[in-house]
Amino acid sequence: MEGASQLVRTGRKSSIESEPRTLRFHQIQYAREAAEYVMNTKDLEEAKRIFTQGLQPVVSVMKPTGEEMTDSVDEFEYSEDRYRLSELRDVVTAPF
């Protein structure tokens, strides 16, 4: 049975292809150095703007049951202040 050992092409992507790409060590090191440069040369508000530029808040998520939960953007902005760290963390040397 010659055809039994061959893979059948279904046109679907494997799950690994939908995973985010992994950075190589030198790319992580470059990102850390760039982040350190921003933190050393910009004030806190400007650094925050640079690091969050282009990000969009997540306003809905799916529960494991498949039910969708939706939060308003206003509620997200309100809750942002409740989850601040009590102390500053060293983000430059923190592992990823």
Image: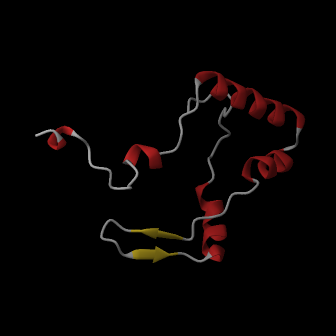
Q: As rendered, which of 27 and 6 lies closer to the eye?
A: 6
Residue 5 picture location, percent across and down:
18, 38
Colouring of the image: secondary structure
In the figure, 20 relative to 83: above or below? above
Tell me what residue is drawn at x 45 percent, y 75 percent: 69
Left or right position of 48 against 57: right
Quadrant where the N terminus lies?
top left
Query: Front-most of 18 and 62?
Result: 18
Drawn side of residue 44 relative to residue 96, left or right: right
Q: Kindly identify the residue that appears in the image at 60 percent across and 66 percent down.
A: 79
Query: Can you name the residue that lies furthest to the left here?
Result: 1
When asked about the image quadrant of residue 58, the answer is bottom right
Q: Look at the image and tell me in which quarter the C terminus lies.
A: top right
The percent position of residue 56, horizontal first and vertical second, equals 66, 63
Vertical placement of 92 versus 64: above or below?
above
Q: Is residue 87 above or below residue 69?
A: above
Residue at the image point whose x is 54% and y is 75% from the top? 71
Of residue 90 and residue 35, the one placed in the foreground of this image is: 35
The x, y position of residue 78, in whole percent, is: 65, 70
Residue found at the very far front of the displayed protein: 2
Residues 80 and 32: in front is 32
Q: How many marks?
A: 0
Residue positioned 74% across, 47% down in the render: 51
Q: Quadrant of residue 72?
A: bottom right
User: Left or right of 90: which side holds 58?
Assistant: left
